[in-house]
Image (cartoon, helix red, strand yellow):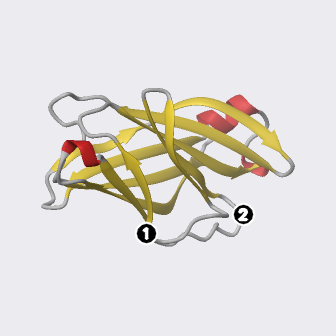
């Protein structure tokens, strides 16, 4: 069976705004572009931000509003978790749902300097609920030379592809 890649670009754009001083931490602002599910109900369902095993913020499809802010710490490894909602007609099992879904992350400075470029996130779980699979993936931003730095603004974009 030949699989056809369908690019479903629900660009959930995340803007990280770093505080001016390390003790102020980092403000995490969330923006979305094209945030409606496709004709099958597929969408980026949830994004959460973690540092040192502590959830710093969680934005779901249902509670999203433009400009949500989350305070995180500067100079600390940051993990982004992303859940994609996938119509179960495109997979027959949770393992197939994971293999048919890819989530990519991009992180740039405001000036356009790329920190992370179209890096595939790592799938770690999938579950079927009703007519959808919820595929979870993560990316850990753990580059000591590019950790969130106070006084710098970052943009974080997520994109997912579904192979049908």
Q: Quadrant of residue 31?
A: bottom left
Q: Which residue is mark 1?
A: 67
The image shows residue 155, relative to residue 50, as above or below, that is: below
Identify the residue at the far front of this view. 23
Q: Is residue 40 above or below residue 121?
A: below
The number of discs equals 2
Residue wearing tag 2? 40
Q: Is residue 4 visible?
A: no
Q: Nearer the viewer, mark 2 or mark 1?
A: 1
- Residue 36: assigned label: none
Q: Residue at x 54, y 70 (%)?
A: 65
Residue in the picture at 74% in, 41% down: 91
Q: Quarter holding the N terminus?
A: top right
Left or right of 6 in this view: 20: left
Label 1 crowding class (10 Å Cα cut-off): few <14, some 14-19, many 20+? Answer: few
The location of residue 42, given as percent across then percent down, is: 66, 58
């Amino acid at each position: 069976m030949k699989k056809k890649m369908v690019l479903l670009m629900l660009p959930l754009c995340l803007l990280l705004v770093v505080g001016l001083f390390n003790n102020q931490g980092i403000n995490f602002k969330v923006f979305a572009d094209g945030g409606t599910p496709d004709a099958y109900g597929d969408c980026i369902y949830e994004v959460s931000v973690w540092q040192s095993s502590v959830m710093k913020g969680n934005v779901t499809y249902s509670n999203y509003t433009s400009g949500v802010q989350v305070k995180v710490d500067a100079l600390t490894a940051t993990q982004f978790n992303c859940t994609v909602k996938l119509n179960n007609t495109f997979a027959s099992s949770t393992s197939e749902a994971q293999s048919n879904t890819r989530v990519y992350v991009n992180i740039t400075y405001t000036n356009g300097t790329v920190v992370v470029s179209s890096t595939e996130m790592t799938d770690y779980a999938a579950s079927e609920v009703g007519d959808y699979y919820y595929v979870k993936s993560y990316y850990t931003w753990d580059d000591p030379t590019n950790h969130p730095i106070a006084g710098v603004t970052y943009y974080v974009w997520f994109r997912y592809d579904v192979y049908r």
